[in-house]
């Protein structure tokens, strides 16, 4: 993949980031009842979750992404804030240790914006004070997993394509009573129903994953807010790793809390964006 930077071509986003290197290695509507209303249809309740977040405005977010292929398993964790109305967020993503367990990676700061992912502490030849910018619609997965954390708004927008939704039961999430739903995601339908800022990235994801279904579990509080959402994606091993490679399974979990928290996200100035070539590791 090649990323455009100020008219120059930057290889990579080498699958976009150090995080993408890990992925490659492992893979080889408003109105009606609120989503948390017990009388609401399960499918409608889940479909409205993204709109409910936008109305709420902002929150803190904690993310976890586990990738498994064969006997290899890695987990990447992140934490930060998100402004759902602006479609912007800031996360600090922590990579796992090297296989030998000897090296501690520096956290990568990620800024999420409609159609773009900005990363700092990318390493591999990128100056410490520069950001790497990636067009998320150019990524095979629409950045649902490449950056090591699923964009919280994109995770919610995926639910617009929810199918076969069932109500599992009531359960507390971090001390908050929620209703637990489960189902699968029709990626093409989610992309078609998504907001303008997310549509292109979800359309890319609809083409990039294997034919295995994307499944989800979501926990909505009494106000219809997502407190926890988990998606399970499957990469086509041969497409992403070569002939004979096994599929890689990625489980992405996002927890949302402290709604209404200040979440001002300032994107880098043009001069702060790296315009050279991102080296492969």
Image: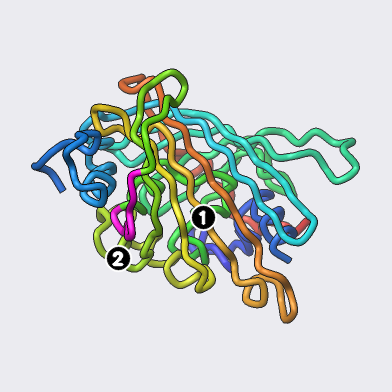
Q: Residues within 10 Å of mark 2 (few under 14, many from 20)?
A: some
Number of numbered discs visible in the structure rendering: 2
- Look at 66% across and 52% down and name the residue there: 67
**Horizontal arrangement in the rendering, residue 141 relative to residue 44 (left or right):** right
The picture places residue 278, in percent across and down from the top left corner, at: 67, 56
Is residue 35 located in the magenta-colored stretch of the structure?
no
**Horizontal arrangement in the rendering, residue 193 relative to residue 129 (left or right):** left
Residue under circle 2? Answer: 189
Q: Which residues make up the magenta segment?
A: 160-167
Residue under circle 1? Answer: 134
Q: Quadrant of residue 240?
A: bottom right
**Horizontal arrangement in the rendering, residue 21 relative to residue 146 (left or right):** right
Q: Residues within 10 Å of mark 1 (few under 14, many from 20)?
A: many
Query: Distance of mark 1 from mark 2, alpha carbons?
Result: 25 Å
Circle 1: element type: strand
* Quarter placement of the N terminus: bottom right
* Quarter placement of the C terminus: bottom right
Q: Nearer the viewer, residue 132 or 57?
A: 57
**Horizontal arrangement in the rendering, residue 3 relative to residue 201 (left or right):** right
Q: Is residue 117 above or below residue 36?
A: below
Circle 2: element type: helix
Q: Quadrant of residue 21?
A: bottom right
Q: Nearer the viewer, residue 267 or 79?
A: 79
The earlier-in-sequence mark between 1 and 2 is 1
């Amino acid at each position: 993949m090649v990323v455009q930077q100020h008219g120059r071509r930057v290889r990579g986003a080498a699958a976009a980031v150090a995080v993408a290197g890990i992925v490659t290695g492992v893979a080889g509507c408003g109105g009606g009842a609120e989503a948390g209303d017990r009388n609401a249809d399960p499918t409608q309740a889940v479909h409205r979750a993204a709109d409910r977040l936008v109305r709420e405005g902002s929150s803190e977010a904690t993310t976890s992404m586990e990738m498994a292929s064969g006997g290899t398993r890695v987990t990447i964790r992140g934490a930060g804030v998100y402004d759902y109305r602006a479609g912007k967020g800031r996360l600090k993503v922590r990579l796992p240790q090297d296989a030998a367990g000897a090296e501690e990676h520096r956290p990568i700061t990620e800024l999420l914006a409609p159609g773009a992912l900005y990363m700092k502490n990318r390493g591999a030849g990128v100056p410490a004070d520069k950001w790497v910018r990636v067009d998320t619609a150019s990524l095979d997965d629409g950045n649902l997993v490449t950056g090591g954390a699923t964009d919280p708004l994109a995770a919610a927008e995926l639910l617009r394509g929810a199918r076969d939704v069932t109500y599992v039961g009531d359960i507390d999430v971090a001390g908050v009573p929620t209703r637990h739903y489960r189902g699968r995601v029709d990626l093409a339908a989610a992309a078609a129903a998504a907001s303008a800022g997310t549509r292109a990235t979800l359309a890319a994801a609809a083409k990039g994953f294997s034919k295995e279904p994307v499944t989800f579990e979501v926990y909505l509080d009494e106000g219809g807010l997502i407190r926890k959402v988990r998606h399970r994606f499957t990469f086509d091993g041969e497409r992403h790793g070569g002939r004979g490679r096994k599929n890689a399974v990625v489980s992405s979990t996002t927890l949302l809390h402290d709604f209404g928290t200040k979440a001002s996200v300032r994107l880098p100035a043009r001069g702060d964006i790296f315009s050279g070539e991102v080296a492969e590791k």
